[in-house]
Image: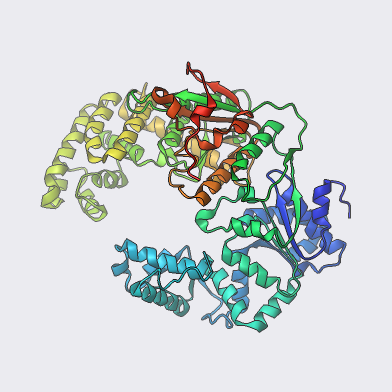
Amino acid sequence: MDLSKLNAQQREVVMASPGNVLCVASAGSGKTLAVVYKIAYEISERGMAPDSIVAMTFTNKAATEMRERVQARIGRMANEVYLGTIHKWCLLQIRSHWREFKMLSPKIRILDDYADVLYCLPDYEKIKDNKKLQEKISFLANYFGRCVSYNEDIDPNASSDGDALRIYEDMRKFQYENNVWTFDDFIYLVHKHLEDSEYYRKEISSKIRLLIVDEAQDSNRLQQLLAAKLTSVHGNLMAVGDDYQGIYGFRHANVEGFVEQAKEASVYKLEVNYRSLQGIVELGQAVIGYNHGVQIDKVVAAGRTDASEKPTLLLFPNDPGARTGVLVENEIKHVARWVSDKVYSGTEPHEIAILFRSVRGDFSRLLQAELALMRIPYVVRGGANIMNDKHVKAVIAACAVAGNFAIKKDWMHLLKLVPGIGAVGAGKIASGQPDFPLMVSIAPPKVRDDLSKFFEVLKTMVTQHNSTEACLNTFYRWYIDTLDRADQSMAVKIMSMLLAAFEGSASLTEAVQNFQINQQEMAAHKKDKSGRVVIGTIHSSKGLEFENVWIPNVHDESLPWKLAKTKKDLQEECRCFYVAITRAKNELNISCSLDTSQIFNSNLSRFLTRQDVLDRLELRPMGMHLDFRPAEFVLEDRC
């Protein structure tokens, strides 16, 4: 088999002797290529039966891509190799051996998670409002169903109470009696059967001559135990992954188990990054150095020889005395202009990504508003789109009513804004629209005064129909008082965005219609992802790459995330930052808005304050006249 397209490290992985193998594959190092060649090599050169190879991937998309590439090398034999997720493999096992698993039939009803199962129980009414009880049941489900800890240190009886244990047992009984299961249950059931039945364990593991686990750093403890049992006869396990990119601790991924495996396995490293320019690779290595001592150290080199510049760190003034909604305005507008310049200079929009730790914050939503005003199509990955924002929906619904083109959905949305009116009440009251007096008479007596006041607002808006600004301000004055303080700030910013979007329209009807047309044009790009800029979470970008990446809002309450308190949490946050950095191929910008009134007590992310990291960045203060001294930005290390 011709291996000339592989580098020396990749060839070593492909030709590795059978046994317990750990392939530590750095970002952009050609991991998939090595796995594809490994499968083809075992079949064509070592005579391994295709149906004796099981390759478990993290996603179905990865499995499809891998299968196509294996087919290109060995043809139809690739169809006999199992290539898919671990959940699907376990489901196929249960369907094939459903009697052994004590199932009613192979026709299994699959639910998303345990909450859906609880909803089906007769005691659900007692459970639904008891959050503490739900948490205890969730603990039991995770303990038994996902093997979160799976050791003697945790006693599920001590971590729960009688009611939770009883409900958990009732839930399991219901599942068996009704053939209702979740995806996580499939792994639990197969692992349990492998433990309980020696015959089944030997039968299954003797058929698997090679088990490949892709993205192994994201496996949880139960999945790792399952892999060990499936290879108990032949002992041929190849775990492929990168502990630097283990970012799914919130899903109970056990990256520590991946690192521990290096002590027992034959370790092969892929350390050439063919994706990113040298400056980006060096920055990633410097940042991940924060976790030195708790990871598998790698010396990653850039495989590209293009001329490389340092990634840029842009610092913006963040004046706490500025008016509401302008605290990070400079940074947001700069990012939006950067995107606009890239798009209009010919860069394909899908090669531009703005990555956040979370896209649910104000920064992301305001950036979306800026791009919407610039009519730059974008896709939001890992969070809600600004066009589905509740404040936007409220304004559009109010404008539709004032413009006399509302539908029942608009009325339902608006009526639920009135204090004391829920979904059921809104449905009854809406049956009387658009007759305001009739709707008030239908409403319960306790909400009639508030409802009448709201209708007066709508009547005023009708008279202001030809002045979009006056109309929006009338609604805003009423709407803002219905919100709590946390929501009010965002509502102000959204209202400013809509005022700008509606500007120039002759009437409210025209303004809303233009706005909706703009939405439709953006939606048209959903079928063609090459036409949209990506605004996404770091987690949603895993496995992807972009020509140009901007990581904004990198302060010490965002990266690391404000809830990260333990040493383990902070290590994962550092890996998140590393993943974001290594998505970039050619250009990488990082930015943060600093408190200029207390500049030397800054909230710049701790991951950027070490000197070896700063040495690999081009520092660019934006409108900040200060003597920048990096050492002064170092915060006390919570680790």
* Above-or-below relation of 21 to 106: above
Q: Where is residue 107 in the image (x, y as percent from the top left)?
A: 54, 75
Instruction: Residue at 71%, 27% (x, y): give it.
Output: 308
* Above-or-below relation of 506 to 37: above
Snapshot colouring: rainbow
In the image: residue 591, left or right of residue 2: left
In the image: residue 566, left or right of residue 209: left
Q: Where is residue 418 in the image (x, y as percent from the top left)?
A: 21, 44
In the image: residue 164, left or right of residue 533: left
* Above-or-below relation of 112 to 607: below
Q: Where is residue 334 in the image (x, y as percent from the top left)?
A: 50, 24
Q: In which quarter of the image is residue 399?
A: top left
Instruction: Residue at 81%, 56% (x, y): give it.
Output: 14
* Above-or-below relation of 110 to 74: below
Camera-nearest residue between 463 and 608: 608
Is residue 575 visible to the viewer in this orientation of the structure? yes
Instruction: Residue at 71%, 39% (x, y): give it.
Output: 275
Camera-nearest residue between 44 and 449: 44
Q: Where is residue 393 in the image (x, y as percent from the top left)?
A: 34, 40
